[in-house]
Image: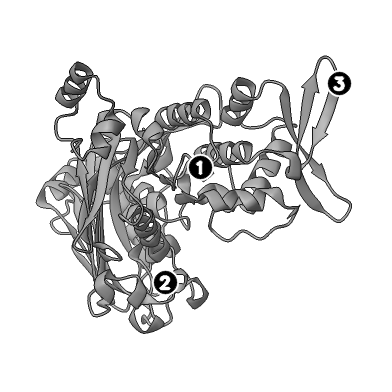
Amino acid sequence: MSAILKSIEIGNFKSFDHIKLDLDRLNVVVGPNGSGKTNLLEGIQLAFGCINYNSPSDYPFISFWGYNNAVHNSDSKRPITFKFQLSIDSYEVTYESKISGAGSFLRFIEENIIIEGFLELKRLGSRLMINYTTQAIHKINLQKEFLKELQMLRQAFMGEKSDSLDESLTIEAMNISIDGIDESKSAFSFLSFNLYLSTKTRHGKTQYGMFMLEPSHGNQNIPAKKPFILVSPIVPVISDNTKSGRRVFIPLIEYISSFFSYNISPLSMVNNSRNKMDRLRVILVRHSSIYGMKEPVPLNRPYEGLLSGEVAISWLFNKFNENGGLFPEKIKRAMEDLFPNWQLGFRVTEDGNILLQIKEINPGSGTLTLLPPSIPDGLFKLLLIMTAIEMHPSILLIDEIENSLHDSIIQYVMDSLRESGVTTIVTTHSSMVVDRSELNELRIIEKIDGESIIKSISKPVQMKKKLLELGITPSDSWLYGELA
């Protein structure tokens, strides 16, 4: 089971007044230069950057040279809005936020985390409200064993002592309000300081999980208060740490939090990975990132929360050592399929730096060692994308996927993205990429009167049939403005 990201909405960001992007697993955004393709990727990355903001040094608008350069038409009085809709197991989930970065200060004006039919966590400035639906309360009351455990935990948390449990206990209302939440940090940041999991949950012995929330924890501005318990449904997750795959149960609130925030990473814990680089939630691959792969990388390079070329080399080196001199399976297979005579490896220099190296095996002339200046850009680009796939982010963004890649490698990469299960958005202005995309994967972007708009192909099956009858490729139709 994994989260299916169904749509993203962005408001008041750069060339977007408001857009909604309906998503497949692979989404190919095609448009001319200046239409807003990169803006879309940067907007999605910004949403995750705001959620994971920790300190002024992480101010997410630095790269835009200030908030007024990030908003549509430089209107800094308007907030930027984001909305994500997901399906997780049988639950429909919505996360939406309204933020401002005016005055060099990040502020969450509003946030909503909605589990349809169960609860809503609504944040207004410094107040967080948690409201359960009547339907959820009814279902919880049917779980008598869970109610007993809930009662015991409440007594323990509140310092109460009782020799017996109330067998007739039911819950009539579970609405909670917390004041004094740090306005510069996401509600997910508050949850990451406070999650406490009941011991039974990960073994699937109940339909619900329990968290202890301590309002004053992590924020000195909140007066000390007694903790309370947050109830969440649980969902199954398959661990890939073993060949057979171990089924583990994760509370849905924790799963949602880990989708957006690298501060909470139950899936990494399930798979016994404590490497911070495995917790990237959004990865943006730019072509310029490959240049960091060509340089010596320090063994103890600090992690900065982004996938750069240097971080990719460091991650690959760590995995190479962890696996006894073997690369992750997808990367190993890509090298065998696309570069069968090249053997990928590393060299550690005397001054403690890592260098990527290739051994080119030629039956007639022996083995030649190639160091970064002799390795083609296309190989670095392939490794960067395949590394991003192996890191299992919540969403993968690739800007101008076609740069430095041969046609056959583009096809291989796109097939790998489809098979990966990672929701991916790639941008392109290449006819070659358009013709290797399914029509339902294509999103057409254009700018009209200074505003970027995105369109999908409304009837992809009928359009494909029409193009075949006319003998026209999808890229021909796009170039003449007839595809969407």
Q: Amino acid at mark 1?
A: Asn
Q: Amino acid at mark 2?
A: Phe
Residue 423: quadrant of the picture: top left
Q: CA distance from mark 1 to mark 2?
A: 27 Å
Residue 1: quadrant of the picture: top left
Q: Is residue 60 left or right of residue 167?
A: right
Tag 2, which secondary structure?
A: loop
Using the image as rendered, state which of residue 279 and residue 265 is in the foreground.
Answer: 279
Marks 3,2: beta carbons within 8 A: no
Determine which residue is flagged by label 2. 61
Tag 1, which secondary structure?
A: loop
Using the image as rendered, state which of residue 102 and residue 91 is in the foreground.
Answer: 102
Residue 168 image position (x, y, % from top left): 17, 48
Q: CA distance from mark 3 to mark 2?
A: 52 Å
Q: Residue at x 14, y 23 (%)?
A: 462
Marks 1,2: beta carbons within 8 A: no
Determine which residue is flagged by label 1. 403
Residue 239 image position (x, y, % from top left): 48, 33
Within 10 Å of disc 1 (Cα), the crowding (few <14, some 14-19, many 20+) is some
Q: Residue at x 16, y 22 (%)?
A: 466
Residue 35 image position (x, y, % from top left): 30, 54
Question: Which one is earlier in the sequence, the residue at label 1 or at label 3?
Answer: 3
